[in-house]
Image (tube, rainbow, N blue to C red):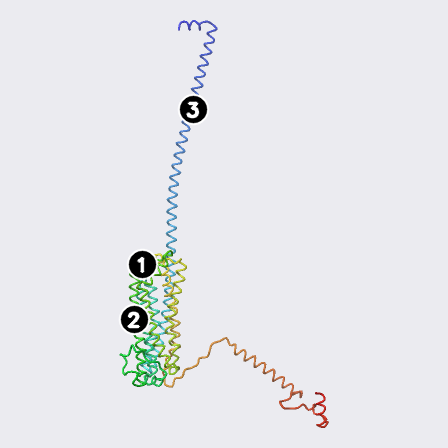
Amino acid sequence: MTEERRECETPSRRSKCGCLKYLNFSIITVLSVLVGFMFFQLQYLSYRISSLGYQLDREEMRLEKLENVSYEVQDGQQQEIANLNEKVEKNESLTLIQMAGTFVLLTCLLTMFHMTSHLRNFHEPVVQRKVIAILWMSPIYALTSFLSIVVSGIEGYMAIIKDFYEAYVIYTFLSYLIAVLGKGDRSRAVLALAKQADHLTEPRKCFRRCYHPLPEESPEAKANAILVECQILAMQFVLCRPITSIASFVVTALLEDEYGSYDDDNSTAEAQKYFTSPQFWISMVQNISVFLAFSGLIKFYHAVSNDLAWISPFSKFLCIKGIVFMTFWQGLVINIIVSLEAGGRWEEGNSDTDPREKAMRLQNILICLEMLLFSIAHWCVFPPEEYEEGYRRRNLPKPGIGFSDFVADVGLIVESSKQAKRSRQMRDGNYLRAGEIRPDSISDEPLEMQTELDVSIS
């Protein structure tokens, strides 16, 4: 240290040492300033980062609040849309119920007025009593369909009532024809049928125990056996149809989960399962029972069609069975259309989207409308004055567009023009009637010369 100090004490060394000290101080100062500047920059950056992080947190919180608000708004909008859809569906349902109720009310009023017309003109009590029983068909079908629309879940019970009354009306119609044939007396109907005993088919031997007397004894016995046969065939339908309807309802309720779903990949197995199911055999029994009932009814109709021609039994039968056939085939078509629209699949547990519910609802609404039309048809084919003394069937004028009147008017104009032409010719002296000869064609020459002239000309 003493040597360094000595060296620095020299003038040259002294200036050099001062420069080095100044340079070191400057460098340290600059570095300190840079370090301080960097420190402040780092602090400023950290502050900015922390402030930005705080702002991001606030923005995230605000976004979360907005999302919650948007979710709430979206939920509220969805709830409002659902409420509006529910109100619209409710209004549509009320509109359909009001429309169906109007048709049902009109059907009942028209049928009741028709019944009272028969009661006011009760000339044939035995016959007209059966007519009134037949007229109840339209109100019963309309009321059961309306109740199925208003109260959900009772479609099966209402179907049982409709099936029973359908079978009862078929037998009542046969009994009505027998009563009309005998004018309320069965023995007179047997005598009227016995007049055609030679043309009647033999009664079935399976019902031989019910025939008394036996059909071989006399024509009257044969006619009585045929009546008994037709009544048995129609009566079994009255007893069989309610039983099969109840059995079908119970089987459908018990096996709804098994047969309610449809598997596209295994349709063959599903078809085989159906053909071995109780529902298939119940349908077979129903079809056989219907066939037997109608075979008996048609057999009796063919036997006495000429004697009953004055009451037009075929039109009456169409108005009765048309209700059943129309509702059956109409329901089948509606089920096919609705199931095709839904892709052939049912959505269980949701009545709003279940095609079966839609099909049943539409079917019931149409039945309410159609029963009004059938009640009008019943008024036309079951007139109360039909059973008055000396009644004759009236041929109602046929509706049309008046084209025959137009053709008749054209013919009148043509004939008038022809007559006018004849009148002008008669005034001018040029008109000749049949067999007349024009005066100027008569010649003064002898007949022989005229004949020769005609021959030469020819």
Q: Nearer the viewer, residue 297 or 384?
A: 297
Visible residue check, residue 280: yes
Residue 38: mark in rendering: 3
Residue 221 is situated, as x and y percent measured from the top left of the image, at 30, 84
- The residues bearing labels 2 and 1 have C-alpha atoms spaced at a distance of 26 Å
Residue 103 quadrant:
bottom left
Residue type highlighted by circle 2? Cys
Which of the two labelled residues, at mark 3 and mark 2, occupies the earlier sequence position? Answer: 3
Residue 240: mark in rendering: 2
Residue type highlighted by circle 3? Met
CB atoms of marks 3 and 2 within 8 Å: no
Instruction: Give the residue displayed 34% in from the left and 61% down from the top.
Output: 272
Residue 284 lies, with reference to residue 188, above or below; the image says above
Q: Which quadrant of the rendered structure holds the C terminus?
A: bottom right
Residue 335 lies, with reference to residue 314, above or below; the image says above
- The residues bearing labels 1 and 3 have C-alpha atoms spaced at a distance of 82 Å
Q: Nearer the viewer, residue 333 or 421?
A: 333
Visible residue check, residue 102: no
- The residues bearing labels 3 and 2 have C-alpha atoms spaced at a distance of 106 Å
Which of the two labelled residues, at mark 1 and mark 3, occupies the earlier sequence position? Answer: 3
State the residue position of label 1. Answer: 258
